[in-house]
Amino acid sequence: MNGNPFESREARRLFLEQQERLRRLSAVDRDLVRLGQMPRLDRWLEQIEATGGCEHPVYLTGRSSTFDAVSGELLRQYSTDGEPGGRLAVRCRNRRATVCLPCSRLYQGDAWQLVRAGLAGGKGVPVTVTRRPMVFATLTAPSFGAVHRAGRCRRRRAALCDHGVPLGCGRHHHEESSSVGQPLCPACYDYVAHVLWHAHAGRLWKAFTDNLYHHLGVLGGVGRSGARRQLRVSAAKVAEFQRRGAVHFHAVLRIDGPQSPGAVGPVAAAGGTVAPALLENEPPEWASVDVLVAAVRSAAGAVALSVPDSTAYAVGRLAFGVQVEVHAITGGGGRLTDERVAAYVAKYTTKSAEAAGALDHRITSVEQIPLLSVSDHVRALVGTAWRLGGLAELEHLRLRLWAHMFGYRGHCLTKTRAYSTTFRQLRADRARFERRHLVGSDDEITVGEWRFAGSGHSPAEALIAAGIAEDLHRARELARDHLTPGWVGGARRGPRGAGGPGHPGSDHDLTSRRGEPHQSGG
């Protein structure tokens, strides 16, 4: 029999019975049957494991050639022609946990490395940064109206607002309660000010960092220009969405000398003399941690921005909230160590507005807003951003493009150039480690030609990928608790920390095979 089900009556009967059994299965089960019959299923599983179980992999077709960097000799070639379906899966690289949890874990780990390198050295940052004044600051958004709080909510009072709603709650809310973050009176809540504050939050942060030099100069008695000549403020910040939908900034601020970190050489001070304290790019003696704490507090309270005039709204000047927390960072033994701060900052890099019950995708038309499966508070924020985006005076803010983020268009994690390494460098280091792990050398040049061939999983593929991702995550958790000190998946595993060559935090599960392009992509 050549496989033709219509060659005989018996073959036809068996074929129809098989099709009937398949029709009775669910869509997922039918897809599992298809996947089980896939040629070279083992190689497809290798690809999915190499992507870490990415939930939305990108498929590529093409080829690559690897040459010796010194002699130019062709070492090996690779083509997707021999792969299942003639294509290769790579990571989607999305940082949001609600979109792709495996890729968000890798991004979170890179964020931990980036932040900690600026606190403790490593990754190209000298360890001398540990001697410099460093603080962990939280700058909050102002109040746009009373909202329900976790724990004991606002004390209930007899007075009512202008809309007849009590000015308090008096109940006790669980942390995960849907009431937390919702306005006591939606009619009293200033949604316009909320959205406009978000739209200007990036400018507020820029004004704060610029103003910080002035306040440091005043406290040090050298003035703004003197402060800029004698020191540099390096920073890394992450934006966290609170339950009420407002952004808070958590930031690491460090005082360096006026040169790039690690720069060595004489620096001319006033009068043409050489300032010995700056020979290794150390900040001046007056720039202590206490001075930095005081300057951050005063600078945050002094910053204010105006909004474009319009007859459509009445919003005053925009400023940070009155709740400003500033704590000194210590290398060890204190309440805030470099590793704890790095872990805290990295935790928020994989979250976005969805942490406030909002969206992880953009709105393309006003008709979508009433159909959103969100709270009334979130729908009001999205609708306000969309409405304000139609005003000519606010066109430059692109509010409709960022309505799903309530008008906030900043990146989740930003840093100054001199703070530490970059995500690009971390990914390059990981790829170099993987090459060394595969062929024992990184003195190679790979030239490739690739084309997009699709993305995403079928229902059965998604189930298998989720299982692989969970197994890899569980392995990292076990390694964190039981293996040698180091870093795994964004979590600390011991006193040594991260940064050493070949440390256990490297993505062994993402190692490419058979000469394929690197699939870490974090």
Image (cartoon, rainbow, N blue to C red):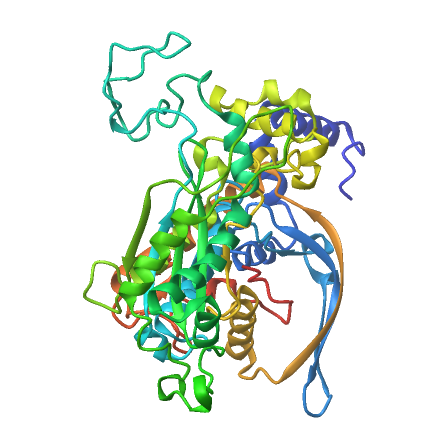
Residue drawn at x 33%, y 73% is 132
Which one is nearer the viewer's eye here, 199 or 286? 286
The residue lying toward the viewer, choosing from 299 and 389, is 299
224 or 284, nearer to the observer? 224
Where residue 278 sits, quadrant-wise, is: bottom left
453 on left or right of 191: right
Considering every residue shown, the one lying at the far right of the view is 7
Name above or below for residue 9 compared with residue 318.
Answer: above
Residue 284 versus residue 27 in the image, above or below: below
Count every numbered label the image shows and give the total.
Answer: 0
The quarter in which the N terminus is drawn is top right
> In the displayed image of the protein, which residue is found farthest to the left?
333
Q: Is residue 375 visible?
A: no
The x, y position of residue 425, in whole percent, is: 55, 70
User: Residue drawn 69% across and 29% down?
Assistant: 391
- Report whether 181 appears left or right of 107: left
Q: Is residue 244 above or below residue 122?
A: above
Q: Is residue 38 visible?
A: yes
Image coords of residue 458 (percent x, y): 62, 39
At x 48%, y 36%, the residue is: 354
Is 174 positioned to the left or the right of 85 in the image?
left
Identified at 42% across, 48% down, the residue is 302
Q: In the image, residue 96 lies at what x, y percent?
A: 51, 45
| Quarter occupied by the C terminus | bottom right
**Residue 55 place in picture, x, y as percent:** 55, 45
Q: Residue furthest top?
A: 164
